[in-house]
Image (spheres, rainbow, N blue to C red):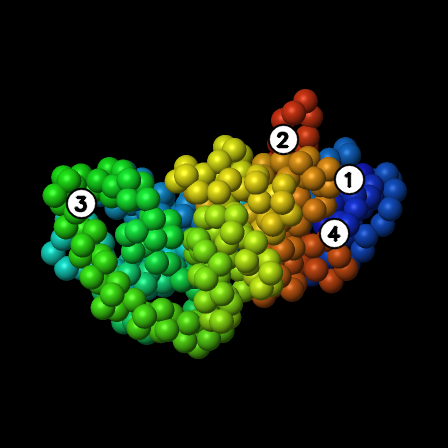
Amino acid sequence: MTATVLANAKLVLDQEVVTGALRIKDGVITAIDPGTGVPSGAEDCEGDLIMPGLIELHTDNLERHIEPRPRVNWPHASAIIAHDAELASVGITTVFDALRVGSVVSNTKASYGEYARLLADEILDLRAKGALRISHFLHLRAEVCSETLTAELAKFGPADRIGIVSLMDHTPGQRQFRDLSQLRAYVCGKHGLSEDDFQAHVASQIALSERLGVQHERAAVSEAARFGAVLASHDDTSAEQVATSARQGVHFAEFPTTLEAALACHKLGIKVMMGAPNLIRGGSHSGNVAAHVLAEADLLDIVSSDYVPSALLSSALLLGDLWEDLPRGVRCVTRAPAQAAGLPDRGTIALGARGDLIRVHRAAGLTCLRGTWVQGKRVA
């Protein structure tokens, strides 16, 4: 296999930035050399940054490609390939595609059906055919407040590349939707519910949670162990909820909604992940704690692009500027998520690490991605 050499670059290592060159062969980094020289056959990076490829643990981006307009179902293979290409184009080299498991199928105006098993099969099939540019794993979002979670989880197994199972609980009146006005705006806007319909929806969801919530939560924790997946919590709000997450074996917390919850996570050794849109916009669109508040309090460990893929790179640079420590900002979107998800082979520029890299140019306040490599092969 021909070696790829990137030279005359500012290499963003775990703890420092050094000028030099690196060589990738057989998919891994085999040499890191200091200096500004450009060997024959090397790509001259002209002083640009070379960073590890970005690692995305939780993205809803595939859903946007599958359903580009409400009730418009796009051909799945085309949607997955377009999603994959978009991620490569913004520097993401490893993604955990978030798929909801657990549906509400009774005759309500806000029902939603099963889709994860079919879509997972399509992702895995395209990967096996070599049709995808970057590395794909599955992230099963286990919806505790649902009717079918146990049955849907049973359709998956250890061979399905499930890296993460997150415990989602959207019962009205707690976690993300403790403010019912936020839930009203979301559900009524999405499903066109009247006020009476909304009140009936809230009542039915609370009853569903009371009937099956504990059973579903236990099943999700058990199934994550069967898959060999990392367990994540979602929208922890209180120290009590974080303590429960710790007892369940949660590795990282997705989008804690309060400073109290983030503090509790760090006390119990749970890494905190926040959304890049929250960080870049300066606050949460749902009225929860602002990501920059956690960053300033040294309570932010991992960043996810959530629903804006290009925000991941921007957030790393923003944090690097905020902390006056570029490697630390970059670790939030590379090494930290790799470690949280149990992927020790990537997320760092080091000998023997996967040759997943990006080239970034910064000038006059602008950021431009100039190249993405996966195992030494240029994909964007």
Question: As drawn, is 309 to the left or to the right of 111?
Answer: right
The residue that label 2 is drawn on is 367
Viewer-side label of 3, 4? 3
Query: In the drawing, does residue 227 fall left or right of residue 336?
Result: left
Q: CA distance from mark 4 to mark 1?
A: 15 Å
Q: Is residue 154 visible?
A: yes
Tell me the mark number nearer the camera, choosing from 2 and 3. Answer: 3
Under mark 1, the amino acid is: Ala
Query: Tag 2, which secondary structure?
Result: strand
N-term-proximal mark, 4 vs 1: 1
Callout 2 environment at 10 Å: few (<14), some (14 to 19), or many (20+)?
few
Residue type at the position of mark 3: Phe
- The residue lying toward the viewer, choosing from 74 and 17, is 17
Label 4: state its secondary structure: loop
Q: Which residue is mark 1?
A: 9
Q: Earlier in the sequence, mark 1 or mark 3?
A: 1
44 on left or right of 379: right
Going from the N terminus, do you reach mark 2 or mark 1 first? Answer: 1
